[in-house]
Image: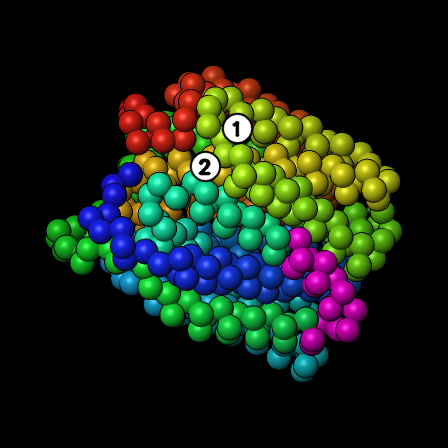
Amino acid sequence: MSSPPDSTVYRDRDFRVFAAVRFIVTIASNVQSVAIGFLIVTLTHSPLELGLVGLCQFVPMFLLTLPAGDLADRMDQRRLLSATQAMQSVCAGLFLLLIVFHTGGTWPYYLVLILFGATRGFYGATSQSLMPFLVPPEKLPRAIALSSSVFTTATIAGPALGGFIYILGPTVTFSVSLTLMLIASVLTATLGGRRRPPHVDTGASRLERVKEGIDFVRHRPVVLGAISLDLFAVLLGGATALLPLYASDILKVGAVGLGFLRAATAVGAAGMAFALARWPIHRHTGIIMFAAVALFGVATIVFGISTNFYLSLGALAVMGAADMISVFVRSALIQYATPDSMRGRVSAVSMLFIGASNELGEFESGTTAAWWGTVPAVVVGGLGTLAVVAAWMWLFPPLRKIDRLSDAETAPTS
């Protein structure tokens, strides 16, 4: 990872603002997600319709994430990120209008989710590529862990807050999301930090620039293995999309219980993130990552068969802790392996994988639940995660053998 010529441009204030913005946006997104999930379940009681919530966000995000990464490499990420957050507030406002005017049917909500998915395509790539410009390289692993701690703390508070606020009605819920997104947009516009050298036009087309980012990831087995492992493990083992059904039909705990179920994964992730900030992974990084993803799969199976609310909470917490290890390792490997001029595009490729594992995973979970039933869908997904771990240990030996995080700078290419 290239070092800046003058580290004095870094300001502690910028990372604090960045972390605060991430906290606010995550709170707002989770509050909105709980509201949408419960609203769709209330209107339809259909797992397939619930799965469409993820698909409507994934498709535009899939189409726009790579172009957004190229844009982040050619524009000021701060302005682009601020504009994206402003558009997310517009989406919350549209949801609010749909509630106020009592629009019939669910299709208008799916249209707004498509727009929200488009904004997430820009938000993810831009946000991830910005952090190395706000902290010096030697502090990056700890900054990643601290940022992850902030994110997971917000993920704890967001769903629980969304569940409690939803008791007051969806109008209040979407109003809170709208306000928080606007605050985040204003704060992002104030960020300073190190500036990337001015973009030099090489004459390459946008498609060629995007392909450069894809090729960069494709020829680095450590990076490709880490992000694709996360993709398929979470795609198969993601049970969070079905939490509204577990809350209403299996565990019978209602909207407040749904908030706690959504928060349980984040509780485990937050605890692990704080532990990683205090005791970072120094050795045997690859093996630890594979072990964590295998534990994620086992916890998914336990959650799938559980009919006890507290056992389900525990299984979700273990899933969150295991997933956080994977997130930390993947994020650090990408940042160490990527030069400044490629950060936006490489981050976009990474976010595309993450988006596929989350949003497409929601659709996959909803579809398989409609075919096989909710519990079998989750259990089979957990078994699939374990199979992916075994396959990836064989397909990506450089990832399995990697020792220190910083070794990603000199890891073999293919």
Percent of width and height locating residue 187? 44, 70
Is residue 277 or residue 177 the one in the foreground?
277
> Do tag 2 and tag 1 residues touch (Cβ < 8 Å)?
yes
Q: Is residue 163 magenta?
A: yes
Predominant SS along the magenta part = helix
Residue 289's disc number: 1
Q: Is residue 79 left or right of residue 124?
A: left
Q: Amino acid at mark 1?
A: Met
The alpha-carbon separation of the residues under discs 2 and 1 comes to: 9 Å
Is residue 116 or residue 142 the one in the foreground?
142
**Residue at 30% from the left image edge and 31% from the top image edge:** 409
Percent of width and height locating residue 198? 18, 58
Q: Is residue 13 magenta?
A: no
Is residue 105 or residue 181 the one in the foreground?
181
Please give the range of residues in magenta. 156-172
User: Does label 2 or label 1 sit earlier along the sequence?
Assistant: 1
**Residue at 30% from the left image edge and 23% from the top image edge:** 412
Q: Amino acid at mark 2?
A: Arg
**Residue at 77% from the left image edge and 73% from the top image edge:** 168
Q: Which residue is mark 2?
A: 330
